Image (tube, grey):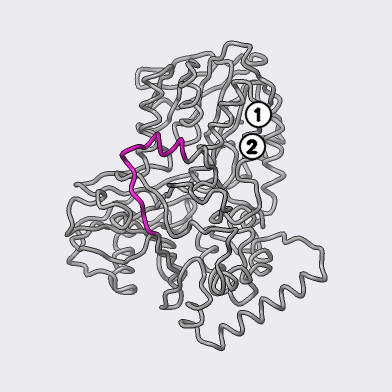
Amino acid sequence: MKGGDGPDRDLQVTILGAGPAGLAAGHYLASRDVPLSVLELNDYVGGLCLTKEVNGFKFDLGGHRWFTKNKELHEWFLKLMEGELVTVQRTSRIYFDGKYYEYPISIKNVLTNAGLFTSVYAVLSYCRAAARDLFSDKEPVNLREAFVSQFGEKLFDMFFRRYTEKVWGCPCEEISSDWVSQRSKGLSILTTIKDAIIKSRDVVSLVDEFVYPRDGYQRICEVMARDIESGSGTVHLSSPVKRIVYNGPHDFTLTYHTPDGDREQHATDVISTIPATHLVRMMEPKCPQAVTDAANSLRFRDLITATVLLKKEQVTPDTWLYVHDEDLLFARLHEPKNWSAAMVPGPEYTSVVCECFCSKDDDLWQLSDEQIKERVVADLADKLEFIDRSEVLEVCIIRTLYAYPVYDLDYHAKVTEIYGFVNQHEGLHLVGRGGTFRYNNADHSVEMGQLLAKRLLGEDIDHMSVNTAQEYHEEIRNVLRKLSD
């Protein structure tokens, strides 16, 4: 993570993890003829950006869209994926107490669904929170305080509390307000009302449309891996790293496992996208106890995706549906066919990907695959009335560990401890969601990887500045209006 590396030395780079961040760094370096290798635990590239194919059905582990405010990055992406992109019209809704609400929140829609009394109460509760904030310089500490400050108590309880607690598995009071700052800073009931009355000439919302790889999100990583291997790099699958020995500045010896046995390789620079909690345990000499304790106490949220393959033309019109009710097993679903017609074997078929957020060894994780299948189909058929059981062809269950970093109230101090340790190893760099323990979107991770690669080649760039601006992610200024033209 130290800067000032400069291009005046020979680089030999090893990248840990073939997700979007690691591959983006490798893609840029390989295009400049830097020798590198990518070591990947799985037998596929993409990490969380996995697209599975079963009997002609394709589906991602949760819907990943491409969206960025960086014009240069977007133009690079369009060139990388030329001929493979489709444009998706976004329609997202919230399912709350048997009713559907538009997302992002629309005051007109809330008024129609919730009624005048609830809508007025929502506005008054926001005014009360705003007045309280006016006479206090205290910054929100936890997620509840941050959302109440932005939307008031009523809308927080209606549209944020239940869903957030389903996703993170703990009360909002136990999650840091940093999560809100990264995801929705600048969005509030006032901006929502303003947006309903007048359309600003300075700010353009891109929430209504985005681009997506026709055959699934993993294609982005597959194309980057292909380009790396046709350049100066190699990608090793099923090759988990076991040990990283720091011999001195820009001098590393790595041991990794392959189906044919353990192997060693040397590197001047190591780019790690694997969970920071794992990285510090692999280092030799061993890290101090304080770093081990910090790593051990960082938490990730895990994910079970249940994808229901259907003989049915369409289930919902939604790009995403956020499911708040606690008695439904999943918290979010998407219908891949609504993103791309190529995700199903024919027009008479569709599928629904249901995301069940959990933690390893909790009650949900302990359910068998068959139990999860039965629960999900029952929720879709009996509670939501989306499908008939006779339309179900198959249900595919995928379990994913370390899906989302949990921003508990102490996470920042723990991450700072780990960053400090990494900074003592010249040539060791963190990048990506797991590597930096930062809730990145895929485009953030790609941008991080590219900036780090440029830094290794001598540019004065801080790749860790990505995804730190405290503004609403889904708005951009007029200067970038033609981003996807």
Q: What amino acid is labelled 1 in the image?
A: Met
Residue nearer the viewer, 174 or 161: 161
Q: Residue at x 58, y 15 (%)?
A: 268
Magenta-highlighted residues: 75-89
Q: Residue at x 72, y 73 (%)?
A: 130
Element class at badge 1: loop
Residue 111 position (above or below residue 205)? below
Disc 1: which residue? 1
How many numbered circles does the render carry? 2
Is 85 contained in the magenta span?
yes
Residue 428 position (above or below residue 9)? below
Percent across and percent down for residue 457 are 59, 20
Percent across and percent down for residue 81 are 37, 37
Disc 2: which residue? 464
Residue 242 position (above or below residue 264)? below
**Quadrant holding the N terminus:** top right
Residue nearer the viewer, 363 or 105: 105
Q: Are marks 1 and 2 in contact (CB under 8 Å)?
A: yes
Answer with the quarter of the image where residue 449 lies.
top right
Is 223 contained in the magenta span?
no
